[in-house]
Image: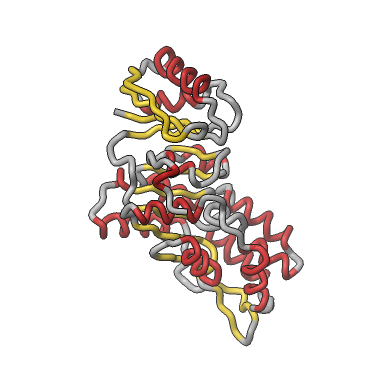
Amino acid sequence: MFIATLIANDLDEGRNVQLAEDWLSSKADCRIVESRLIEVGNAADIRFEGDPVRARQVLESVPFSPGIDIVVQPEAHRRKKLIVADMDSTMITIECIDELAAYAGIKPQIAEVTERAMRGELDFEAALDARVALLKGLSSDAIERCHAERVTLMPGARTLVRTMAAHGARAVLVSGGFTVFADRVAEAIGFHRALSNTLHIEDGALVGTVARPIVGAQTKLETLIAERDALGLAAEEVLAVGDGANDIPMIQAAGLGVAYHAKPKTAAAAHARIDHNDLTALLYAQGYARADWVA
């Protein structure tokens, strides 16, 4: 049995759920078992039997009302027991290295490299080394200013993580960004563990290098596997979410791998995409109504 969840800020259930059922039946050859609302105006489930890959393909071509995200997944293990998440542009609204570069007066130069790395056009580790090298000599005071002035939690981040934790899930933040930001972000949101890169700082300034080993795509994957195995979970019990190409291996290893407002390569590799809604969409995808959320 599978579930297709429709998520939006203004769902218009009557029109959109009926459209989804019609297309699943006529174009995906699925048998509709039942439909139910998770939250009026925000989320609805359609339980069905059939091919979930074909169902997702069909649903992504339906002429829904604007702003609807769709998650298709097995009914079993829908509520995940482990979430592994990226930080920059996923759990927070910025790319920290780009914003640090603003204090050095070179944000456009570094942001261009960041964008290409996140799109999978550049090797992540080499691109990180090159960008950090350009920050050599920047006062470490810029880190504190950047955190205070520019780091903003992604809408829904705290609610997503704290709700899952309250229902027994473990939450791990694994970031290609920097410990000076990630540790505080993880604490603010409610993660149990954070793993990220360490900037070398001497005499109150950035040295222009990063400690080894670099937290990149392979480390993210290995962290997910290690956390999953330590908890004795199946892959189907794991949720991973990120936006960049370096998140693809962990996204593909999770039972539900989600591309969140992601780069095209990441979106194409994920099991589901959230393009329109905030991170609470991942609570609706797990069947949590607002009454179950931890604010």
**Residue at the extreme right:** 105
Query: Where does the image place residue 216, in percent across and percent down from the top left?
Result: 47, 59
Residue at the spot x=45%, y=35% of the render?
39
Residue 50 visible at all: no
Q: Nearer the viewer, residue 109 or 21?
A: 21
Residue 287 sits in quarter: top left
Residue at the spot x=64%, y=70% of the render?
133
* Residue 2 vertical placement versus 162 (above, below): above
Numbered circles on residues, count:
0
Residue 165 visible at all: yes
**Residue at the extreme front:** 291
Q: Nearer the viewer, residue 119 or 121?
A: 119
* Residue 147 vertical placement versus 248 (above, below): below
* Residue 138 vertical placement versus 261 (above, below): below
Residue at the spot x=38%, y=24% of the render?
35
Tell me the quarter of the image containing the N terminus. top left
Q: Nearer the viewer, residue 129 or 269?
A: 269
**Residue at the extreme top:** 26
Residue at the spot x=54%, y=63% of the render?
177
Query: Where does the image place residue 289, in percent across and percent down from the top left?
Result: 42, 40
Relative placement, left or right, of 104 versus 40 is: right
Query: Where does the image place residue 254, in percent across and percent down from the top left?
Result: 36, 46
